Amino acid sequence: MLQNFVASILPANYWLSKSMEFTKRNSCGTLWYLKKWFVFYNFIFLKEELFEKDYVAIIKLFNQFIESLPADTRDEARNYFFEIDLRQANFLKLATFMATEQTFATPNDKKAYENNAKKFYFMYVMNLGGQSGYKEQMKNLMAAGVNYEKIVAEIKATMIANKEANPERKLKEQLSDFPAAIRNERQLFFYYGFFQGRETADLSGFYNLTNIGKAVVGANFYVLLAIWEHQKLKMISQSPLADMQNLPDKNSFPLPYEKFAIHSHPYFALLTVLENRKTIDLDTYQYVIAKTSNETNLLALCNELNPQMIAECKQKAHSLNRRAETETEDFTKELKKFILGLCEMPKDFRTNPLCALSWLENKQVQVRF
């Protein structure tokens, strides 16, 4: 089996969805970030504007979710969900943040301004981004209650003071880059079945929620766990929309492209390997497991999996001369997305009823019982 498996490894033929912020959110309990993200997304982007009753509804949804959590985690959950505290009288409202004295030439210009402001507002309430430079300045301005129009003006003034070669272009880049996490995560959640097709007519490129996505908004902790596991089981190893970069030219470097194969149930395959092996390391996942397909005999793979096989698969992947094959970042994120829900997160305090795996620690995942 070893030689056949190594020979089957082709460029970009591995489990892939999308890199995103989701995997970084390990400072909270299981799926808290997912719940918070969907509630805010639903209210901010799928409504024209927010009224007082909408903020009350958001607070109610958060409180209901918190009350559904095991008692030991609720105080930490309140700190997380109200990190930017909607309950405070001086909380920055969306209408205030979007307020402008501009006169727009067309309705589309006005809509574009509102969509951009909403993206920034989403980043604000989720407390995302702003690690350094101009982005850090943007985040600090929002925290101080400055609205979007004034933020843009202040950032542009700073760029001019810093003698940027082309402040207009630099400003446009920064305004686009700051909320990029929304775009990346929305694409991931589209793959997971939470979003449906693009509706440019009224959302200028944003996506609408599927019924499953809508269910996340109102779900309690235990229902959300079930939804997340259900959607993982429905995933395939590669989205039909995946963009495979830097493939070798078919004429200059012939490859058996007809042998490209997907896995229609990668999550189940990963669980099968873990059940049989009890532990896997990142190299095993990246160079072997993530390259399995419907053609792979998983039980035979589990029996034959050994350091020699891993080393030969790794050597073959490195010989493909694609950076994406050899760097660990995307594979690490992919593995974390699969084990999320079945592993213990820092704020769970051993209260997740589905916890069967360790988090990815020291580049290993282990079955805990």
Image: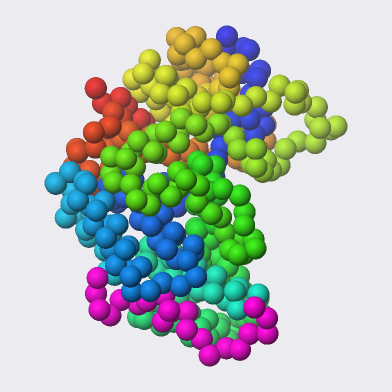
63 versus 4 height, above or below:
below
Q: Position of residue 30 (x, y in %)?
A: 30, 44
Q: Is residue 369 magenta?
A: no
For residue 146, say whether it is visible: yes
Nearest the viewer among 175 and 92 is 92
Q: Is residue 155 left or right of residue 352?
A: right
Quadrant of residue 156 in the image? bottom right
Quadrant of residue 88 in the image? bottom left
Q: Quadrant of the C terminus?
A: top left
Residue span colored magenta: 87-107
Q: Residue reaching furthest left? A: 72
Residue visible at 34% across and 42% down in the picture? 224
Nearest the viewer among 213 and 294 is 213
Q: Main secondary structure of the magenta part?
A: loop
Q: Position of residue 71 (x, y in %)?
A: 14, 46
Q: Is residue 176 left or right of residue 96?
A: right
220 versus 39 height, above or below:
above
Q: Position of residue 340 (x, y in %)?
A: 37, 38
